Image: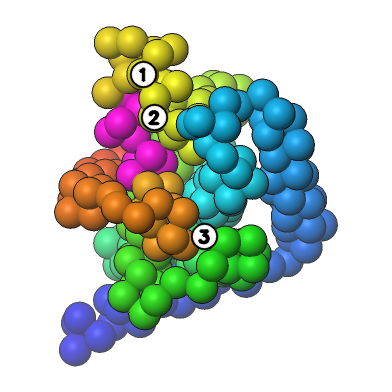
Amino acid sequence: MEVKEWIRGAVLVAQRDLSRFWRNIYWLAGQVAMNIADLVIFAVIFRGLVNPAFIPDYIRFITPGILCLAIFISAFSIGREVGIELRREVTQYLVSLPVTRGALVAGRIMGGVLRGFLYQAGFVILAVVLMSMPSVDKWILILTSSFLLALTMSSLSITLSTLTRDFNLQAAIRSLVYFIFFFVSNVFYPEKALAMRLGSAAPIAYYSPMSMAVNLYRFGFNYTTSVDVLFNLAGLIAWATLSLLFAYKVYIRNLTR
């Protein structure tokens, strides 16, 4: 019975966060427009700059990266809300709710995951149109990758937003994380170009959760014919597990202060 109550509490919290997400319709419209603009701008600019020997079709190359970007933006929004609640001391209200603190934290993280899934859905359809229809087993791989990436980003955003209550510092940390994840990965650039530019620092991009997810997306949508599925999945599982543990510990610490 306690387990059922715990799950029920987590689901209610996640539903609350999801309903708040849909209320920001203008923010969502702006983010969708920005993501589509990213696809168009990068495709137009880099299509003529990138060596065709590395990337024959940049539009198809960048499309899986937009899927990662969609997950990042939507799942990371939960951390921004958690940070605002901490600064405004809304946490005093949250701990008074008839749910355990563990269920509260789980619900917040799951709310971020659901945001990531729903927001990404439209871009998945776009990927099918621009690339190809995946087979059933590759659909499973794509959905699993999206879940693990959304779980990582949701947990990581909560961790970063609860490390400090200073809004400017939170914004600076988020910007730094955004820069590292997207520009020190193979989301926008091929691995060969990264190895040439980063040199000994190239492994940072290789072990990035963004690189692992985009590798699986490109394989799932048949852009690449082969990829180390086991390595990339294991890497995403490791990222998701560690991020989840850190988020739980840091958020609980703030709730119990």
Crowdedness near tag 1: few (<14), some (14–19) or many (≥20) residues, C-alpha within 10 Å? some
- Which quarter of the figure has residue 175? top right
The quadrant the N terminus occupies is: bottom left
Query: Label 1: which residue?
Result: 195
| Residue at (64% x, 46% y) in the render | 59
Magenta range is 204-213
In-image side of 39 versus 110 (left or right): right
Vertical order, 103 against 109 (above or below): below
Disc 2 target residue:
191
x then y, percent, for residue 234: 18, 51
Tell me if mark 3 has few (under 14), some (14-19) or many (20+) residues whose alpha carbon lies within 10 angstroms of its own.
Answer: many
- Tell me which amino acid carries mark 1: Ala
Query: Which of the two discs, 1 and 3, sits closer to the camera?
Result: 1
Where residue 191 appears, as percent x and y from the top left, is 39, 29
Q: Residue furthest front?
A: 53
Q: Which amino acid type is shown beneath numbered disc 3? A: Gly
